[in-house]
Amino acid sequence: MQLETGSLSEEETEAILNTLPLDITFVDKEDQVKFFNKLGSRVFVRTKGVIGRKVQQCHPQKSVHVVNKIVESFKVGKKDVAEFWIRMGDRVIHIRYFAVRNKEGKYLGTLEVNQDITEIKKIEGEKRLLDWEGL
């Protein structure tokens, strides 16, 4: 796959997406789930059964109105990002939605990115050196 900033094979692309410490789900301009990465420990479990399903069917009924508001705001160009953070037990989860647009600004879909930030929130000071034992 030739990209503006380099090239990647299909194998490399899939491996990169599955290595990111994030849950990623892409919903196309028709509100259909098209892709999710297979991170070893996803915050929100996905099965291949969601592929092709409307995004509204992938969320609890009580939050569908919020999903619709986000997607509609992205489609009409009012907003480009929506973010939330929630507690799941003792974990803190950062949930972000991004409008995906082409170079001309045309809406292509929505990218949902979830990350467990519990350990990140504990970071203080600086760590400038690698401290691996037995290199």
Image (tube, rainbow, N blue to C red):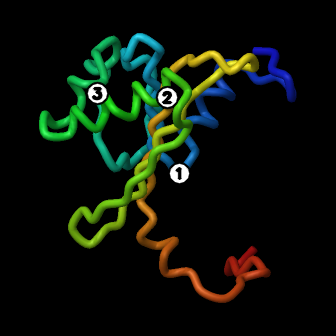
**Residue 80 picture location, percent across and down:** 56, 37
Residue behind mark 2: 74
> How many C-alpha atoms fall within 10 Å of the one at disc 1: few (<14), some, or many (≥20)?
some
Residue with the mark numbered 1: 21
Q: CA distance from mark 2 to mark 3?
A: 26 Å
Secondary structure at numbered mark 1 = loop
* Residue 118 position by quadrant: bottom left
Give the residue drawn at x 41%, y 11%.
30
Mark 3 burial class by Cα count in 10 Å: few <14, some 14-19, many 20+: few
Amino acid at the residue labelled 1: Pro
Along the viewing direction, whichever of 95 and 14 lies nearer the viewer: 95
Q: Nearer the viewer, mark 2 or mark 3?
A: 2
Tell me residue 128's x, y (percent).
78, 81
Expressed as whole percent of the image width and height from the top left, the position of residue 113 reads 47, 43
Residue 114 drawn above or below residue 38? below
* Residue at the spot of label 3: 47
The earlier-in-sequence mark between 3 and 1 is 1
**At numbered mark 2, what does the secondary structure look like: helix, strand or loop?**
helix
Q: Please report whichever mark, 2 or 1, sits nearer to the chain's N-terminal start.
A: 1
Q: What quarter of the picture does the C terminus occupy?
A: bottom right
Q: CA distance from mark 3 to mark 1?
A: 18 Å
User: Which residue is nearer to you in this view: 123 or 135?
Assistant: 123
Of residues 49 and 101, the one drawn nearer to the viewer in this rendering: 101
Q: Is residue 92 left or right of residue 125?
A: left
Q: Is residue 43 above or below residue 111?
A: below
Point 41% across, 59% down: residue = 116
- Viewer-closest of 106 and 114: 106
Looking at the rendered structure, the number of numbered marks drawn on it comes to 3
- Asked whether disc 2 touches disc 3, contact meaning CB atoms under 8 Å apart, the reply is no
Does 106 sit left or right of 29 as displayed? right
- Name the residue type under label 2: Phe
Residue, far left:
61
